[in-house]
């Protein structure tokens, strides 16, 4: 009995010593320091730009581009003016524009004149007058008389003696000096009448058109 107890004690003691030795060997092993985690640099992949589809602006009917304005022909191929049945005539001496009738049946041009006063200057005939129409009277102008003519009217007995003068006029881009007889045209529709003596060499007439040439401002 005693022998068995001793044997048991020896076994327990051996087991304890072995466990202690094993634990000591584990503790004696060097402990490696813990390495901090290494962060790798992040590489960003560039994003491709997203192309937005082109959107054409909506055009309303009022915003649609207008076709180019084509001005009507104002000259013939050989450079002559094209005149309509009615045109604007600018008279530089009076600094005003007046409506004119283009009359292919009349030989001489005529201008509406009132307060006509003949006088002499340096031994020659001159005349003073104002141009009047539709109640509007121009400033007084003086011009030398080129000649005197007698005009017989069917509506009146006898004849009238009228002065013929030269005056500058402008139609479109043409500035020309032409003859005018001075007559009271206040009862007529147009203060200026242009006859063949003006346009036979510088213009052609298209009676189907009106105010072909631009008005001089």
Image (cartoon, rainbow, N blue to C red):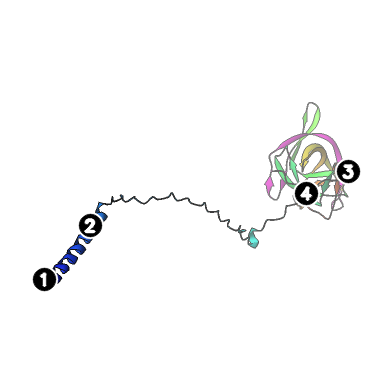
- How many numbered marks, from 0 up? 4
Farthest residue toward the top? 122
User: Local crowd at mark 2 within 10 Å, few (<14), some, or many (≥20)?
Assistant: few
Instruction: Give the residues drawn in magenta, as a range.
Output: 129-157
Give the residue pinned by disc 1.
Answer: 2
Query: What is the secondary structure assignment of the residue under circle 2?
Result: helix
Viewer-nearest of discs 1 and 2: 1
Which residue sits at x=14%, y=67%? 6
- Residue placed most toward the observer, 97 or 158: 97
Work out how far the residue at label 2 is from the one at label 4, CA to CA, in angstroms.
134 Å
Query: What is the secondary structure assignment of the residue under circle 1?
Result: helix
Viewer-nearest of discs 2 and 4: 2
Asked whether, in this view, residue 42 is left or right of residue 54, the answer is: left
Query: What is the secondary structure assignment of the residue under circle 4?
Result: strand
Viewer-nearest of discs 3 and 1: 1
Task: Please provide percent x and percent y for residue 149.
Answer: 86, 40
Work out how far the residue at label 2 is from the one at label 3, CA to CA, in angstroms.
143 Å
Give the residue pinned by disc 3.
Answer: 200
User: Local crowd at mark 1 within 10 Å, few (<14), some, or many (≥20)?
Assistant: few
Task: Please provide percent x and percent y for residue 34.
Answer: 31, 51
Asked whether, in this view, residue 29 is left or right of residue 152, the answer is: left
The reply to whether dot 3 and dot 4 touch (C-beta < 8 Å) is: no
Work out how far the residue at label 1 is from the one at label 2, CA to CA, in angstroms.
29 Å
Above or below for 23 versus 198: below
Give the residue pinned by disc 4.
Answer: 87
Task: Please provide percent x and percent y for residue 165.
Answer: 81, 37
User: Local crowd at mark 4 within 10 Å, few (<14), some, or many (≥20)?
Assistant: many
Q: Earlier in the sequence, mark 1 or mark 4?
A: 1
- Residue placed most toward the observer, 105 or 144: 105
């Amino acid at each position: 009995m005693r022998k068995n107890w001793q044997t048991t004690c020896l076994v327990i003691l051996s087991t304890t010593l072995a466990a202690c030795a094993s634990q000591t060997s584990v503790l004696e092993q060097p402990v490696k320091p813990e390495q901090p985690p290494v962060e790798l640099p992040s590489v960003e992949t560039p994003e491709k730009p997203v192309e937005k589809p082109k959107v054409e602006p909506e055009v309303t009917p009022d915003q649609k581009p207008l076709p180019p304005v084509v001005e009507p022909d104002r000259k013939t191929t050989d450079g002559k003016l094209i005149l309509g049945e009615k045109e604007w005539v600018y008279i530089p001496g009076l600094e005003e524009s007046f409506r004119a009738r283009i009359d292919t049946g009349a030989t001489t041009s005529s201008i509406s004149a009132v307060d006509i006063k003949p006088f002499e200057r340096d031994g020659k005939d001159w005349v003073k007058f104002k141009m009047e129409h539709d109640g509007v009277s121009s400033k007084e102008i003086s011009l030398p008389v080129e000649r005197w003519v007698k005009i017989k009217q069917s509506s009146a007995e006898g004849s009238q003696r009228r002065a013929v003068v030269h005056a500058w006029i402008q139609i479109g881009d043409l500035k020309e000096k032409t003859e005018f007889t001075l007559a009271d045209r206040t009862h007529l529709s147009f203060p200026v009448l242009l006859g063949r003596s003006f346009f036979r060499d510088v213009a052609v007439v298209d009676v189907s058109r009106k105010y072909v040439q631009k008005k001089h401002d």
